Amino acid sequence: SAVISQKPSRDICQRGTSLTIQCQVDSQVTMMFWYRQQPGQSLTLIATANQGSEATYESGFVIDKFPISRPNLTFSTLTVSNMSPEDSSIYLCSVQTLAGEGDTQYFGPGTRLTVL
Amino acid sequence: LAKTTQPISMDSYEGQEVNITCSHNNIATNDYITWYQQFPSQGPRFIIQGYKTKVTNEVASLFIPADRKSSTLSLPRVSLSDTAVYYCLVGGSSGGYQKVTFGTGTKLQVIP
């Protein structure tokens, strides 16, 4: 398993500003993922972050809006840029490791973002 | 990526066994079936994973028929603390890193 922490745990931001969310893992992992979970909804994958390469974004998400850094095998950041109230959501990072036979994802506690 | 279908919600009384079934008709040969549990204001938590037949751990059992087109998560003797959303996912074959897609999940409400 992996232990994941996120900072901040929550924040309230003004429209038009940006917020950077940090994700720290207690072990080295190849693949990290960023998800968004809107109130009462399931998780939606934003992007996959592989160390040493550009992040791969899912349909509907672009790098200008959600730039991601992955400087090493234990850390990643997601920035939510030029925020609007529609960006209010929980943002989660996860890592994928081999757990026995199949790949398994372990999730951080999430960052609850409210945009006014 | 295989799509999954689960009931949106289920209610159960404390002490009962709860079975949540997930359909995944397009599961690939190398796909595993993984279940996650999510409490409000927390990230999903891994519960159990299997490929075929039956898997049991200290928390739950996972039943997978021979055709693997469905799976059933069994929670024995649920308590109020088992109230959560349960997600069934398929994908993530061993040795290959694959993204997985979260479906709608099943919201389980345990009633005293």
Image (tube, coloured by chain):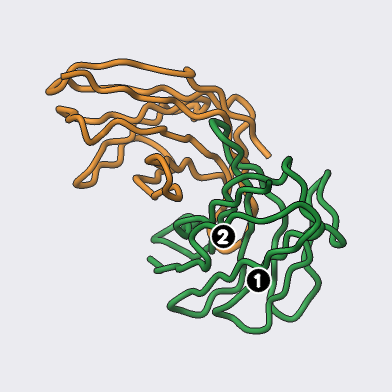
Q: Earlier in the sequence, mark 2 or mark 1?
A: 1
Q: Quadrant of residue A72?
A: bottom right
Chain A palette colour: green
Residue holding disc 2: A93
What residue do we see at 34% from left, 45% from top?
B47
- Quadrant containing the C terminus of chain B in the rendered view: top left
Provide the secondary structure element on which disc 1 rests: strand
Left or right of B96 on screen, residue B70:
left
Residue holding disc 1: A77
At label 1, the amino acid type is Thr
Question: Viewer-proximal residue, B107 or B2?
Answer: B107
Q: Quadrant of residue A78?
A: bottom right
Chain B palette colour: orange
Q: Dot 2 falls on which chain?
A: A
What residue do we see at 67% from left, 48% from top?
A115
Left or right of A38 on screen, residue B16:
left
Q: Tell me: residue B24, above or below residue B28.
A: above
Q: Quadrant of residue A16?
A: bottom right
Relative image position of residue A83 (x, y in whole percent): 77, 53
At label 2, the amino acid type is Cys
Left or right of B31 on screen, residue B60:
left
Mark 1 nearby-residue class (10 Å; few <14, some 14–19, many ≥20)? many
